[in-house]
C-alpha cells in the first residue's frame, strides 16, 4: 500500500457514535459529570449543537479506566486522561501533579509525543492578580512538565467549567511521531506573553498539523480567543470577539499553508467547540458564525469561562 494513503489508523473526529473511540468526549452539565465517565465528560453545559465529539484512530489495542485516570492506545495515537482532586482549592499543586503523572505515563510509552491537551477546572477566574486560579494553574503546569514539553509545547485549551472547584481534568492526545506545531502571526506566542498576564507564561502552541505529508492532513486548533498580539480586544462585545477569533483562525490557516503547503478551509471543519461565558450571547454568536462558512451542524456551543476574565468567547476545533 502507498504509505501516503489515508488509513483506518488516521485520526478521525466525528460528532456521532460509531464504535469505540480513542477519545469519547461528552459535554454535559456539572451534575452529570460524575463517576468513571467523568474523565472524558466536560462539565460545560451544552447550549446547542452536538453533545459528543468522538476522536477515532483505528483499533484500540489496550485501554483502562480507573477513578483517577484513563488511557487508550491505538497504533499511531493514544489518549491519556487524568483527574486530580484539588486539596484546599490548591489548583497549582493539582496542575503540577497532573502534568507529572501525564509525563510519567506518556514519555516511556510507544506514543511519547503530546500533540493536543485539554485542561478543565471550575472557577478559573476566581482570585485576583497573580492569585487568579488560571494563573496558579499555569505556575503548576510549568512546574510539572519536563524539558521536552515546551519544545514545542502541544496545542491546548484551558477552560473554566460549571460548578464548584474540586477537580482538575486533563485530557491528552499523544502520538508515535511529532506533529508540526504552529504559532499565529497575529498573536504573540503564549509562552512569550509579558509579565502582566501572569508570573509564568502559558505553555501551548496555537495549533498542530497532523499528517502534513499524507493524504488527509488535519489542523488541530488550540483555544482561540479575541487576542491580537497579547492584548484582549472588543471587551464587552461577544459578537465582535468571535469575529476577531475567526480572523485569528484564518491567520492560523494561512500559517499552516506557509509552513506545510496544505490549504485548510472553514468549510472543511470537522468539529468546532465554541465556549460562551454567558448563555445569553448565543444568538449573537450564532449570527456571526452563520456568515463564516463553517458548517453550523458541526458546532458544539458550550457554556465555559475563558481564562482571561475580560473575554466572553473562545473557539477550538479540527479542520481538514
Ligand atoms: C489565549 O490565547 C487564550 O493555558 O493552555 C488558550 C489555549 C488559552 C490554551 C492554556 C490558554 C491555554 O491566551 C487562553
Image (cartoon, grey):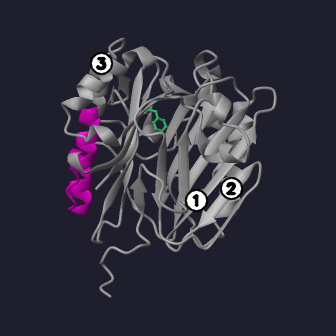
CB within 8 Å, label 1 to label 2:
yes
Q: Residue at x 33, y 58 (%)?
A: 218
Q: Quadrant of the C terminus?
A: bottom left
Quarter of the figure with residue 66: bottom right
Distance from Cα at disc 3 to Cα at disc 2: 37 Å
**Element type at mark 2:** strand
**Relative to residue 95, is residue 13 depicted above or below?**
below
Quarter of the figure with residue 229: top left
In the drawing, does residue 140 fall left or right of residue 52? Answer: right
Distance from Cα at disc 1 to Cα at disc 2: 8 Å
Which comes sooner in the sequence, label 1 or label 2? Answer: 2
Q: Nearer the viewer, residue 129 or 79?
A: 79
Q: Main secondary structure of the magenta part?
A: helix
**Element type at mark 1:** strand
Q: Position of residue 1 (x, y in %)?
A: 32, 88
- Which residue in the protein does label 1 denote? 79
Asked whether the viewer can see residue 77, the reply is yes
In the drawing, does residue 3 fall left or right of residue 149? Answer: left
Which comes sooner in the sequence, label 3 or label 2? Answer: 2
Q: Counting other residues with Cα less than 10 Å from the Cα at mark 3, is it few (<14), some (14-19), or many (20 or more)?
A: some
Q: Position of residue 274 (x, y in %)?
A: 40, 33
How many marks do you count on the picture?
3
The region drawn magenta spans: 246-266
Distance from Cα at disc 1 to Cα at disc 3: 35 Å
Amino acid at each position: 500500500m502507498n504509505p501516503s494513503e489515508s488509513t483506518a489508523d488516521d485520526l478521525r473526529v466525528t460528532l456521532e457514535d460509531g464504535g469505540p473511540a480513542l477519545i469519547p468526549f461528552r459535554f454535559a452539565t456539572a451534575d452529570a459529570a460524575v463517576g468513571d465517565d467523568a474523565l472524558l465528560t466536560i462539565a460545560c453545559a451544552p447550549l446547542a449543537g452536538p453533545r459528543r465529539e468522538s476522536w477515532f484512530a483505528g483499533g484500540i489495542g489496550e485501554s483502562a479506566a480507573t477513578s483517577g485516570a484513563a488511557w487508550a492506545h491505538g497504533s499511531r495515537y493514544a489518549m491519556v486522561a487524568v483527574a486530580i482532586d484539588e486539596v484546599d482549592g490548591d489548583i497549582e499543586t493539582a496542575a503540577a501533579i497532573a502534568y507529572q503523572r501525564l509525563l510519567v505515563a506518556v514519555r516511556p510509552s510507544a506514543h511519547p509525543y503530546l500533540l493536543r491537551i485539554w485542561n478543565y477546572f471550575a472557577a478559573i477566574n476566581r482570585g485576583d492578580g497573580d492569585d487568579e486560579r488560571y494563573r496558579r494553574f499555569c505556575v503548576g503546569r510549568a512546574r510539572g512538565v519536563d524539558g521536552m514539553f515546551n519544545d514545542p509545547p502541544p496545542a491546548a485549551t484551558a477552560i473554566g467549567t460549571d460548578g464548584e472547584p474540586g477537580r482538575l481534568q486533563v485530557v491528552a492526545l499523544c502520538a508515535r511521531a511529532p506533529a508540526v506545531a504552529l504559532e499565529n502571526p497575529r498573536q504573540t506566542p503564549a509562552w512569550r506573553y509579558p509579565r502582566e498576564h501572569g508570573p509564568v507564561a502559558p505553555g501551548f502552541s496555537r495549533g498542530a498539523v497532523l499528517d502534513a505529508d499524507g493524504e488527509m492532513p488535519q489542523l488541530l486548533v488550540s483555544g482561540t480567543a479575541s487576542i491580537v498580539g497579547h492584548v484582549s480586544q472588543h471587551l464587552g462585545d461577544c459578537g465582535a470577539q468571535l469575529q476577531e477569533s475567526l480572523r485569528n483562525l484564518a491567520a492560523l490557516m494561512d500559517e499552516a499553508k506557509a509552513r506545510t503547503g496544505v490549504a485548510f478551509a472553514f468549510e472543511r471543519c470537522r468539529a468546532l467547540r465554541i465556549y460562551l461565558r454567558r448563555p445569553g450571547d448565543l444568538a449573537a454568536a450564532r449570527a456571526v458564525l452563520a456568515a463564516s462558512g463553517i458548517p453550523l451542524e458541526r458546532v458544539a456551543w458550550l457554556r465555559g469561562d475563558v481564562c482571561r476574565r475580560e473575554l466572553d468567547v473562545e473557539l477550538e476545533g479540527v479542520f481538514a
